[in-house]
Amino acid sequence: MQTTHMATPVLEVAHLEKVYGALGNVTRALNDVSFTVNRGEFVGIMGASGSGKSTLLNCVSTIDSATSGTIRINGQDVTRMKQAKLSQFRREELGFIFQDSNLLDTLTARENIALPLTIARTNSAEISTRVQDVAARLSISQVLDKYPYQMSGGQQQRVAAARALVTDPTMIMADEPTGALDSKSARLLLESLEALNRRLRATVLMVTHDSFAASYTSRVLFIRDGKIFTELRRGDTDRREFFDRIMEVVAMMGGEGSDAL
Amino acid sequence: MLCKLAWGNVRRAGRDYLVYLLTLTLGVTVFYAFNTISMQVDIAGIDEKGLAQVMGSMLGDLTYFLAGVMAFLMVYANNFIMKRRKKEFGLYQVLGMGRGRVATIMALETVIVSVVAFVAGIVLGVGLSQLMTFFTASLFKTQIANFHFFFSVHAFNLTLACMLVMFVLTLLLNLRAVRRTKLIELMGAERRNESIKTRNPWIAIAIFAVGVVLVGVAYYRLLRDGFPLTATDSKLQEAMNQFGITTAMVTVGTFALFWGLSGMLIKLLQSLRGVYWRGLNMFTVRQLAAKVNTVCFSMGVIAMLLFLAITSVTCGMSIANVMNENLERYNPVDVSQTYAYYTPDTLDYYKEYVNPSEADRMVLADSTVDLYPAWHGKGKSAGNNDETGKKVNIADVAGEHVQIDSYLSYPVGGSNPSVTPSEMCKIMGEKLPKAFGGSNADAMGLYVTPASQYNKLRQMMGEEPVHIGHDQYLLTCDMGGELVDMYTKYMAGGHALTLGGHELKPATDKSDEDTAAIANSAMGSNPGTVVVSDELLSQLNLQPYSSSLLVNYKQGMDTTEADESIKYTVLDNLLVDGKEPGSWGTFITRSEMYAQAAQMNGLISYLAIYIGFVLVVACAAILSIQQLSNVADGSRSYRVLAQIGCDDRQIRHSVMAQQAVFFLFPLAVGLAHSFVALKVIIELVSIFGNMSIGGTVGLTCAIFLAAYGGYFLVTYLMSTGMVQAAIATRYSE
């Protein structure tokens, strides 16, 4: 379905390498990884623990620096950016959702969601409307004045998603967003992400080792030992079918990850 | 094996242990140095025996106080470290290590840190005590004749004992912590969302308002009532009770203030929408609120401690300063001897204290006696017997001299003074100075002195005599400050005085306090005297109260020698026709007063500075530990902030703002309390002269602020370091 919409590439990763350690004791976490994500795509990255998928996400999200290769987001090469520019870039272009929701304990849901906007010094009237809007979309309007410890895990994760979305980022980075959720909450969150992607054309990059979560995406990149092993496109197939195909690849890769189901 | 593990832990958890180590080292240093004071006094060449004793006993009590402060600090620092280390101890248990062995590791860690802190503290303490000797010498205005390196075994033993007690205490606390904590809590200490202690903001605001009101009313009460020191016996109990209520109000008010602070802050800032929803302000405020809620009690304690420190230091040193500054005025001559007459009020009282034969001799004084010819005495044994039996005559040493007679303002045998400060104030329509409120000085009224004697003293001091006509008066007072102001105002206003039916007009409009002393003294001898012409005085037949002989030594005579020759004199009873109209009073040499004042000044300053410093440092250390542990707890939050694109500068500002509130708010409250208390104290002390808060006091306060500010800065720098480290940690780890 995205073939009709693939106007611009949002993310271009070319020959990315990440090496840990010094001479003699080198771990090659990423080895010549190249791929492109287009605007409005929902891309999953799957791989076993230690496959390099989290390193990839860290590099793309500018939290970690690459050893060599380039990462272009919206045409800008983030590997060459200075620290101060990076903060601004993260603020304006990226939204993050983590495995544990990483909400700030001392802030209410409303304040947590508003945080990226206040950091960017958006005016308070606009903050208010945008927070309301995004909360409504993720059906968390009723918990806006609660503190994280007063919410369920699913609600927390959706608040975190709202925080990632509120700035209208170019790309949403999700690192195992369902990892800490029960299956019902996980499904709710994934449906929200899918809906965001479908209705608002939000670009989502999601790292997961859970085939069920991956089945909500439109394309899955499989990573093994720091390399892209293969990729699967959902095309027009329904989610069940896509899930089965993902499971096949996972089984072929060595079974790791199938324990999620 | 366990030793190795413990040693590795201490090294690895260096940053966490650093705070503990620093606090412990600081404690040991201060404790050791403090307990070497008696040795310092020795080396500084302060030879007064009495002083060493006074200091010794005062220091004994203070040592306990200090040990208490230290213990509190250490337990606090220890809790901080235990919180940080929970997860690791949990891990050992998961790996199958028994609780006993975990406890052993922990004990070993505590031993290592304590030993390092003790050694470092003693080394620093020895160094500090050498330096402090010079400080001591300068405070007591002595020269160090023979400086040598010293080490006090006594202080060392005390410090060691104190450390051991503290060590056992912290160990027991830690063991209890390990035993009682569940494994799941140890392991999951970091992960869970912290539940936030929230308070209903409206209740918080109400409590805050109650705090403000209580403190305000307490201020008002204190300013209105003053300290209960000047009240007379009958009212003292009542005044003390009232003062107790005021104290309770300010204490409760302070705690209420801090309890409600967070709610108040949130509501206030939330109402400023543009400010609240801007940058990290919202995060800063929420973070503050959450922490203030858990530490409001200790913030209250800190505010009160800072209040105590500031007030005691400023007040103690200022009093000492005032006394020093006015010393010259208080002691116009080389030596003075007073003689107190028996008055209607005192005669019966004195009679009770002597045997009947002597009592029979005592009579109501109806005229003054000449002291100069009467000043003969036999030498007295004063430890060395050289002088025993030697007759002493004041004429041997005296050069210029004058006798000043003070009468009460009523006729011989009468009562009810005709000139009192309260009456004078009523005439002027002013409030009676606080220092006088219900005091003896008011009940007794002003003294009356003949002009010739007053002018003789002025001449001796190189001043022009003042002409006082038959119907004129002059008011004198050597206590300075408010009292002199009042008398000057009275004369300048042209108000009349009535004495024995004579209406008198002021002879001049200014009272010269520098020639107003009646005798040498430590803090002034003349609370108020009416000087009238000799003729008038002789007509009035007033009740004699006291006479003083003021003597300057012969020109060219060595003061020390002269002092020595008459110092240990016991004067014979002065009999007039076989009757005794009074008794010899105080004998004071100027040099003795100067020496005493220097020592007193030294002692007060020393204790004030020491106590103040310990309190300030303790407060700052507690705040510092609190802040560092806050930052460590919040490291996850800072990481999240960085990830969602908050730049370092904003985060640093937020940390700075949070810590500034924690450091500055208790300081501000403490300062406000001190300001009010000092205002009252200054009023009270103004009987001794205008209290100036400058010079040494300013310097001391500057040092305190530097110490406090230094802690603030170090805490801030360490915090930003911790925040940077937290941000640098990859989140997927």
Image: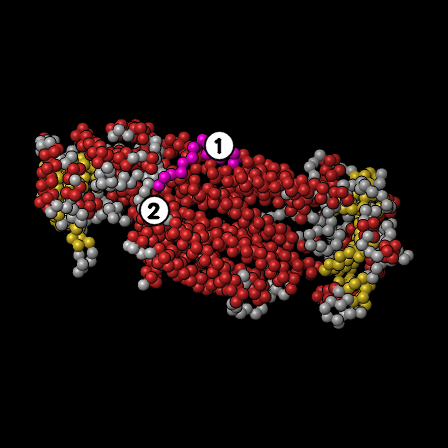
Q: Which chain carries label 1?
A: B
Residue beneath label 1, please? B206
Q: Which chain carries label 2?
A: B
Asked if residue A156 is positioned above or below residue B91 in the image, the reply reads above
Which part of the image, by quadrant, shows the N terminus of chain B?
bottom left
Residue B185, numbered label: 2
- Quadrant in which residue B442 is drawn: top right
Label 1: state its secondary structure: helix
Amino acid type of the residue that numbered disc 1 sits on in the rendered structure? Ala
Asked if residue A192 is positioned above or below residue B188 in the image, the reply reads above
Say whether residue B201 is magenta: yes
First to last magenta residue range: B194-212
Instruction: Please indicate whether residue A233 sits to the left or right of residue A57 in the image.
Output: left
Amino acid type of the residue that numbered disc 2 sits on in the rendered structure? Glu
Say whether residue B41 is magenta: no
Q: Which of A177 and B210 is in front in this view?
A: A177
Instruction: Give the percent coordinates (x, y) of residue B108.
Output: 38, 60
